[in-house]
Every structure is written in structure tokens, then in C-alpha cells.
Image (tube, rainbow, N blue to C red):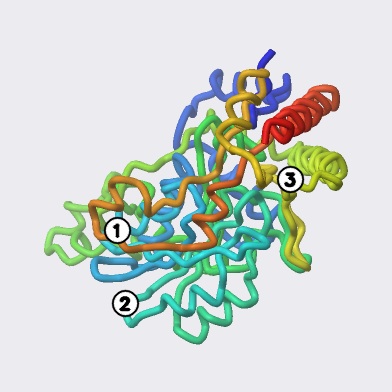
Amino acid sequence: MWIPYGHQSINEDDIQAVVEVLKSDFLTTGPKIEEFERKVADYAGARYATAVANGTAALHAACFAAGIKEGDEVITTPITFAASANCAFYCHARPVFADIDPETYNIDPADIERKITEKTKAIIPVHYTGQPCDLDRIHKIAEKYHLTVIEDAAHALGASYHGKKIGSVSDMTTFSFHPVKHITTGEGGMVLTNDEQLCKRLKLFRTHGITREEADLEHGKNRRDSGNYMGPWYYEQTELGYNYRITDIQCALGISQMNRLEEFVEKRKKLAERYHEAFSECEDIVTPKQLAGTDSSWHLYVIQILNHDRREIFEKMREAGIGVNVHYIPVYTFPYYQAHGYQDVCCEHAEELYRHIISLPLYPDLKEEEQDYVIKTLKEIITDSRGKN
């Protein structure tokens, strides 16, 4: 038996949706892409959506659209996957790390403000585990210093902040559709925005910086022989973009998955509640807390193990067939970051949290008897460990 920490949920409707596209005329750059974009945007309450190859591409595209460039700084959290910070490097800017709130594990708005300099251009708050950050405070800071807010919502599709779905609140919001996320397209990502100009830049970046829109053409329309030079075939590259396209195959799967998103989120919430209840009396386990006014979509269930050797607990859970994991190692501690000037960075709350966290299995198809086994095994391991200390 092996119980992973996360897993996709694929049914016959998903399979049939993909098969239909495979039999169609368009495997990529076809109608399913816009349909998927519209479905996610409508769900989240955003005006515009740009689907891309993966969540990292979404972050890179958002930084490009925001005009992040060499010499700029972008503030984010160290408790995240590396892509949340790497996207600044991709634009030749520099990520700056603000510490976390020790209660919610999300980025601390007070430390964001302490880290702002004249070079700061954007804030990338990460909705860690699916719990929305304190966006009211972050937006006030952004307005005060004229900064762009790019929400990294890779964990938070289906989450809400003061009654609004994540994806409709900030300048841009990015999502990931990796198999362990709330819905999957295999690999895939998306950027939501309410700003038409940002959307145009996102779509341009997705396709090599190439446009066919007549209003955006620069060179051809100024040529003396433009009537002969230009035609239905004509396009121009106006920016240095990337091939970050997503396929119709992936989007067909995403459209089908979106039909079950609310079901997926509700199952995750129920499983999280069962963990809450099971560990409420365990003094050596700290269960996650939620910020008032937020509704987590529970991508991960992260506990802290106190008064025990975390590695011992981790390894014994793995030996028992339970695929626990650790999310995440503070980004600035990686060798690449250490080699690029982050040797003296220290986010005390983030580093303290990292010493204790373990992610328990949480996904829609996790059966209650499997979850009961996870709970029982963890309690037994902790009791046994306590007896040795």
C-alpha cells in the first residue's frame, strides 16, 4: 500500500473530453483554449484569462506583463516552490524575501513593508496550502508604494477572500494545473486579470511576442509597398516572448475537471476537518489555522511536529506506506540563491517553521479508511517516539 500526499482524480468524462479533441481538427491553438480560459475566468469572477504551459510560465508571463526588468526587486515569501521567486530572475530582476506570519504561514505584510526599497516593483504573495493571504493589508501597501500585486494562487483555485473568489482581486493571479492541484491539465497554468492591456501583453508573451492584430503592427504598415508587403499571412514579432502555449488536449481535460471543482474543494475541506478533529488533543501536533475572512481550498494539510525528531517521524511514516512530504524548504537556502548573494538572508519565522512541518495526504479520492490509517499511524509513531525520550 502507498498513500501519496496528493493525486489527480480522473473520470470517464475527462477521458472522453480528451478523446474528442484527439479526433478533432485542432490539437493546439484551437477553440478549447479560449473555452477553458472563459470557464476559469467566469468561475473566479475575472474579466480576462490567459492559459499557458504551466504555473511557472504563468508567473513569468505575469512578471513580463507587469514590466519587471533588470534592476527591479520583487518581494515574495521563502516558504513556497522556487518558481515564485525564480520568475523575478527570469526577468533579470531580483527576488526579495519577506518573512511569514507564524500563525498562518503566509507572507507577513508588515515584513513586506520593511523590505520595500526604491527598486521594488511588485509583490508576489503566495496563498500557501490554499489559504488566502491578508490581501487587504497587501493591497494597501501596494497602493501606498505604487506596486503591482501578482497573486501566486497555485494552491488556491476555489479559495475565497471576504466572499470573493481568488482570481478576481489583484492586478494578476496565477494558477497551476499540475496533477496534485485542485484540477489538472497534466501540466498547465493560467493568469487571470481584470486589465485588458495586461491580458494583451500576457497573450503576446505566450506566443513568441508575435501579433497578427492590425492595430499592434509597427513595421509593415509604414512600408511604401505595404499593400504588397502585408496580407492575411502577415505577422510581426514586437516583443521577445516565449512558446508558452497550452494545447487543446490539455484544455479539454481542464474544462471537464472544472465541472467537478466545487466537489473537489468540498471533499478536501471535509478531509481537513477530519484531520483537525483527530489531532485536536495532540499536544505535539500543531494543526493549521485560517485567517479570519478567508476560506481555504486546502491544497495541502501541513502540520508541525513539536518535541520530536521530524526526520524520524517522516521516515517512519514513509516506511508505513504513507507518502508524507515537506512543503517547503526556504528558497533562499538553495545553492543557486546562496551563490547569487543570499548568504546573509534570514527569515526567522520561515526557518523555524521549516524545522517542524510535514504535509499529510490530502486529495479528493483519499478514502476515509486511508485517512484513518494515516491518523492512527502518526499517533502511534509519536507515542512510540515520546516513550523513547
> Could you tell whether 363 is left or right of 33 in the image?
right
Q: What whole-number distance in Å separates the C-alpha atoms at marks 1 and 2? A: 20 Å
Coordinates of residue 168 in the picture (x, y in percent):
64, 64
| Structural crowding at the residue carrying mark 3, measured as other residues with C-alpha within 10 Å and reported as few (<14), some (14–19) or many (≥20) | some
* Residue behind mark 2: 119
Q: Residue furthest top?
A: 1
Of residue 387 and residue 342, the one placed in the foreground of this image is 387
Q: Residue placed at 33% from the left, 82% from the top? A: 118
Residue 284 circle label: 3
- List x then y, in percent, for residue 212: 34, 53
Q: Secondary structure at mark 1?
A: loop
**Which amino acid, by three-letter code, is at mark 1?**
Gln
Which residue carries the number 1 mark? 343
Seen from the viewer's position, the closer of residues 5 and 232 is 5
Which quarter of the figure is the N terminus placed in? top right
Tell me, yes or no, if residue 101 can be seen here. yes
Residue found at x 76% / y 43%: 265
Label 2, residues with CA under 10 Å away: few <14, some 14-19, many ≥20: few
Q: Earlier in the sequence, mark 1 or mark 3?
A: 3
First along the sequence among labels 1 and 2 = 2
Q: Residue at x 41, y 78 (%)?
A: 116
In the image, 252: left or right of 264?
Answer: left
| CA gap, disc 1 and disc 3 | 32 Å
Q: Is residue 266 visible?
A: no
Say what secondary structure mark 3 lies in: loop
Query: What amino acid type is highlighted by mark number 2?
Result: Lys
